Amino acid sequence: MVNNIWLFILLSIFPVTSNPINIRSYQMNNWIKAAIAAIALSAATVQAATEVKVGMSGRYFPFTFVKQDQLQGFEVDLWDEIGKRNDYKVEYVTANFSGLFGLLETGRIDTISNQITMTDARKAKYLFADPYVVDGAQITVRKGNDSIKGIEDLDGKTVAVNLGSNFEQLLRSYDKDGKINVKTYDTGIEHDVALGRADAFVMDRLSALELIKKTGLPLQLAGQPFETIENAWPFVDNDNGKKLQAEVNQALAAMRADGTLESISQKWFGADITQK
């Protein structure tokens, strides 16, 4: 648009005539033609930044959350950095976690950045960037409840998980006989466990620790993580998804090599959660 405006101005001030009156006007015409050619070349070669829509819940501290009307968190910092390196115009789209994969599949977002766990079912359906978080599935209970120490102690118990997360499927894979009452929530699983409405909740260890720290609720971890999990960004399996996957992997590898990935992790977690 800017180039078109300048082109209009140049032609208005210095109209190019096919019948130059003298040498001076002839030289001026050549100068104008050269300027027009340069502008046209610039317009043809300069590419606009690629727009990438990144979906997240905005309600998953410290990965993605809103504070003072500002979306922030570990995931936001990562994508801000990727956007700079890849010349992306990153647009963040917030929605309930349970609806994010629907937005991805219908093309309304290009990826999901909400600590998405790579499962076999998801890997069969989507393209994934390289993992950027290595963590573990953790059981959390009300403080003082020492009767639950591991996955084997959940029979007959009500266990809360976030709706649409992989932890529901993970629990059921351990519970072949259906003895665990799995209850799904959009938000607030920590409050129901603290109030005794559910016996435990399951999420990744890092988020559980941050949740206990942030809320101050009477909660405690129950034993060690019972499953190692890796988080990565999913893309639709098409040409655009393959292009984004390759570009994001390149940026991620550079961020890992120059220490940026670890630095962002240290900022939010006080530890490097990006390495196995």
Image (cartoon, helix red, strand yellow):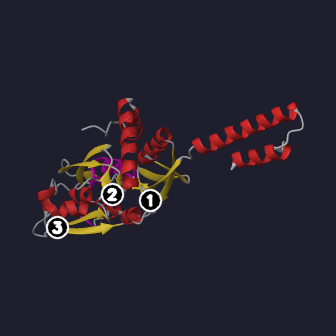
Which class describes the residues within 10 Å of circle 1: few (<14), some (14-19), or many (20+)? Answer: many
Q: Determine if residue 206 is in view.
A: yes
Q: Nearer the viewer, residue 23 or 49?
A: 23
Q: Which residue is mark 1?
A: 109
- Considering only order in the chain, which callout, 1 or 2, is on the residue closer to the N terminus? 1
Magenta residues, as a range?
A: 197-219
Cα–Cα span, label 3 and label 1: 34 Å
Residue 88 against residue 256 in the figure, above or below: below
Q: Nearer the viewer, residue 69 or 250?
A: 250
Q: Determine if residue 200 is in view.
A: no
- Considering only order in the chain, which callout, 1 or 3, is on the residue closer to the N terminus? 1
Q: Which residue is mark 2?
A: 237
Q: Which residue is mark 3?
A: 180
* Residue 116 percent location from the top left of the image: 32, 54
Residue at x 30% of width, y 57% of height: 126
Numbered disc in front, either 3 or 1: 1
Which class describes the residues within 10 Å of circle 2: few (<14), some (14-19), or many (20+)? Answer: some
- Considering only order in the chain, which callout, 3 or 2, is on the residue closer to the N terminus? 3
Numbered disc in front, either 2 or 1: 2
Q: Is residue 216 magenta?
A: yes
For this orientation, the residue located farthest to the front is 19
* Residue 190 percent location from the top left of the image: 33, 59
Residue at x 50% of width, y 40% of height: 84
Residue 276 against residue 102 in the figure, above or below: above
Hey, what amino acid is under mark 3?
Ile
Horizontal placement of 229 versus 112: left or right?
Answer: left
For this orientation, the residue located farthest to the left is 177
For label 2, the SS is loop
